Structure formats: structure tokens, C-alpha cells
Image (cartoon, helix red, strand yellow):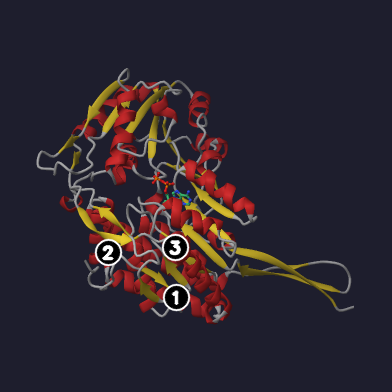
Amino acid sequence: MLLRPLDIDPSHCLIDGRWRGPASGQTLPLINPSDGSILCEIARGDASDIDRAVGAARAAFEGPWGKATAVERGRILQRIGGLVVENIDELAQLEALDVGKPLTQARADVVALARYMEFYAGSVDKLHGQTIPYLEGYTVYTLREAHGVTGHIIPWNYPMQIIGRSVGAALATGNAAVLKPAEEACLTALAFGELARRAGLPDGALNVVPGLGAEAGAALTAHRDVDHISFTGSVSTGRLIQRTAAEHIIPVTLELGGKSPQLVFDDADIDAALPFLVNAGIQNAGQTCSASSRILVQRGVYDQVVARMAERYSALRAGPALSDLSVGPLVSARQKEIVEGFIAKGADLNLVARGQVVTDAPAGGAYVAPALFADVPADHTLAQDEIFGPVQVIIPFEDEAEALAIANGTAYGLVASVWTQNGARQMRLARALRSGQVFLNNYGAGGGVELPFGGSGLSGHGREKGFEALYGFTTLKTVAAYHG
Ligand code: ADP
């Protein structure tokens, strides 16, 4: 299979500006989660491919790419964004097939990828150092400099968006990147590599090596010539990566998911809140780091919110990605098993509604009917652990203090939202919530390419997205000149 219209063979890696087979000659099957069929074979990159990719990145960093000015880098990113938009239909189709994501959601991801390119293209020549008042006879200033070679290990749930925020910011600041996409979904990463090449990105500035986490991913993290690792994925893999990076003392950015709450108070505009309460839980079949999996509702509107969410859940339909229903399949049979395991653990809970899998959904697809639980104790596993599937829990609360205690009462801290008309309460909770982002009377703010994103606790550390990412992908040098 060739990826149209780019004519890339997905069993190849992009290394030093050329497509080549993996050193081992081995491939891995890529599964279509909508029906369980094999979409194509992808390269099983390993340590020797990673070594070549890191070598190519180092040469690019020390060569023309490392010497390019911010304006020149920005222009190339702008061109990549343009090519992404030109290929929106093909990219959306690839992402839908590969991830199992409904087509409309995949299209939104293409738009976000293009926006990241535009945003970083336009912002990088505004990244300034400072001058620092100092002793008599000194002039002191700071320089923002690229780390060098950055490794990007990304998951399967939002390949394009995560490439945009992570690789986009790294390239903008002059790093040379090695991208290891997930073995479950890597087609748009390959397509992106080709588009970047066609946009004039110098050879080696972006290398794409698909493969298994324990092989290509582990080799990238352990490589002694990598200067920074950006990882999005599970807590257990994040922990391994941080440990390995510690061996050679390189900075890591970890984005590891969450258990993000929405707090609905008695005075909230429930009509406005409802679509966000449900959509933030079932978007991408709940396989979203910032999914809102906990809905905390004050007693006065509790019954109303439960009933109205249940009504929406009953209308949800899960089916093949290309049917473009509200919910697609999960990414894999393994993920389906994990999510069904969680639903089974809720057997003693109040399951108030379930959506349906459409009757003509292929038997081999990884479908799970969305499930909504109410009256869930805040310490129940369904209210504490990240499920990564279309499952939400509703938890009642009496007052603001209890809402805050429940909201902050998990090991995660990625995103939270507060629905209330009370301005003072909005301000108090925005400060008190342990969360990298807080939304007031909305959730997610439309994707937020411009909005710094990242968490605390088990959600990880470091910030991507927005201007803030430019700081994360650079290091600061202080120059102190004595001139008398
Ligand atoms: P999931 O369990 O949801 O697939 P992971 O955190 O395992 O999430 O995967 C996210 C990314 O991390 C993927 O690209 C995967 O290949 C990679 N990965 C998995 N294990 C390792 C590892 N030991 N070292 C580096 N990368 C890994």
C-alpha cells in the first residue's frame, strides 16, 4: 500500500530526508480498529534505525538547519501548514482509518495541525532574551537556544495534534527532531514527514521512525546524543522514560493523561453546560488525555443533570470511523478489553445510561457502547483511575469545599472546568484547583493551540502548546560581558 497522494511506503522510515526500509527488514501489521483488518505493514524500527536518525538529526542541527534564522524556520513551518491544509481530505481519511476516529473529528485534528504550524511559524521570531541590570561595567543578556536533538515519543490517540504541538514547537526553535509514533497509529506521522520534506525542511531536521515502544522508543530515550525528550502517553511508560532520561540527565516533558473534572454548581447555565459535559467525555471515544471523565454536580441540579446527560448518552451511536457517528471504535482490541474491564468493575454502581453500537458495525471492530454512571463514590476506581474510553462518572456534592476536595482528590491534575455564574467562586476555584488548565463556563476552549497545556501529579510536568512551549524547547544562556 502507498499512502495517497503522497506515495509513501509506510513500511519505511524517514531518515535524513530519504525513505528507507528499517535496518532489520522487519515490519509490523497496522490494524484498522473499525473492522480488525490489516491496513498495511509499517516499519519495525529498532535501535540501529534510531541511531541513524539521531545521527542525521545531529548533522542537521550542526549544519544548515541549526544555522537557519528564526524567520527562515518560520517560513518553512508556514509552508508545512499550507501543505497540511491542501491535503486535509487525505490526512483526515488516514487518521480516521488508523485511529478509528470519526471523520469529522479527524478533520478537526488536521486543522489543528495546520494551526500549530502557523502559530509556531509566526511566534518564533518573537522569542526574545532579556538584558539584566547588573554590576558597574557589565552588560548581561540572555539567549534562548535550541536544545539540539529532540526526541518525540507520541501516542496513538491524537497523532496529528501532538505532532503539531511538540514537533512544531521543537522545529520552530531550531531543534532537529526524531519522531517515534505509536505502533497502533503512525500513518499521519509518516505523511507529515513527507509534507515537511516537500515544504523544504532540510534533510535530517525531522526523522520519523515507527516501531515498538520497547524497541525504537526505548532506544530513542536511551540514546546518548539526544538532548531532550517529549513524551505523551501512559503513566507507566512516562515513569520509565523519566528514569532512563535521568541516566544521561536530559530534560523531559511528560504529558500522561488525567481524571479531569467538571464542577457544575446549582446556579450554572445547564443548557450551555450539557453539550460540554458529554462531549468532553466521549470525544475520540474517551481516548483523550484531557477527557473529562468526572462530572461533579451540586445537589440542587443533580437529578436534572443526571437525567439530561442520560438522555444524551442513550442517543449516542458507536460505529466505523468512516460512518462518522458520534463515537468510533477504540484504537485496539486490547484497549477495548481494558475499558470493558473498568465497566465490569462498575457492576455495583448505578449505570444510568448506555449508548449503542450500531447493528451493522463489523464484528472485528473494537467497539464499546458509551457508559454513564451516577452516584459514584469519589474513591471508587472508576472515579480515580484513567479509563481512556467512553465512560463518565457523575458524583454529587453539597458545597464548594466538598466539590474542591473531590476535584483535587485524585493523583492527576491536567484539566478542570467550573460551571457557575458566581464570579467570586470562579476566581477562588481557578486558583484552588490543582490543574494545568482551568476552564470557566466552557471546557477545552475549542482546542486551544495558543493555550499552554500540561499537568501536575501523575499528569506529568512541563508545558506544551502556546508560546510557553517555545521556552520548553529551548535552553537559556546567560552572557555577562565586562567592559569597564
Ligand atoms: P499505551 O499503553 O496507551 O499504548 P504507551 O505509553 O505505552 O501508551 O505508548 C505511548 C508511546 O510510548 C508509543 O509511541 C509507544 O510505542 C511508546 N512506548 C511504549 N513503551 C515505551 C518504552 N519502554 N520506551 C519508550 N517508548 C515507549
Measured as percent of width and height from the top left, residue 23 is found at 40, 67
Q: Amino acid at mark 1?
A: Asp
Residue 16's mark? 1
Which residue is at the far front?
A: 24
SS at mark 3 in the image: strand
Q: Name the mark nearer the viewer: 1 or 3.
A: 1
Measured as percent of width and height from the top left, residue 62 is found at 58, 77
Cα separation, mark 1 vs mark 3, equals: 12 Å
Q: Residues within 10 Å of mark 2 (few under 14, many from 20)?
A: many
SS at mark 1 in the image: loop
**Residue 347 picture quarter:** top left
Q: Amino acid at mark 3?
A: Leu
Residue 43's mark? none
Asked if disc 1 is less than 8 Å from ligand 1, the answer is no
Identify residue for label 2. 91
Cα separation, mark 1 vs mark 2, equals: 23 Å
Give yes or no for contact between labels 1 and 3 (Cβ–Cβ under 8 Å): no
Q: Let me know if residue 110 appears in the view.
A: no
Identify residue for label 3. 179
Q: Is residue 345 left or right of residue 165?
A: left
Give yes or no for contact between labels 1 and 2 (Cβ–Cβ under 8 Å): no
Compared with 11, 427 (above or below) is above
Q: Name the mark nearer the viewer: 1 or 2.
A: 1
Q: Residues within 10 Å of mark 1 (few under 14, many from 20)?
A: many
Seen at 50% across and 31% down, the residue is 410
SS at mark 2 in the image: helix
Seen at 44% across and 75% down, the residue is 16
Seen at 52% across and 76% down, the residue is 60
Disc on the earlier residue, 3 or 2: 2
Measured as percent of width and height from the top left, residue 369 is found at 22, 35
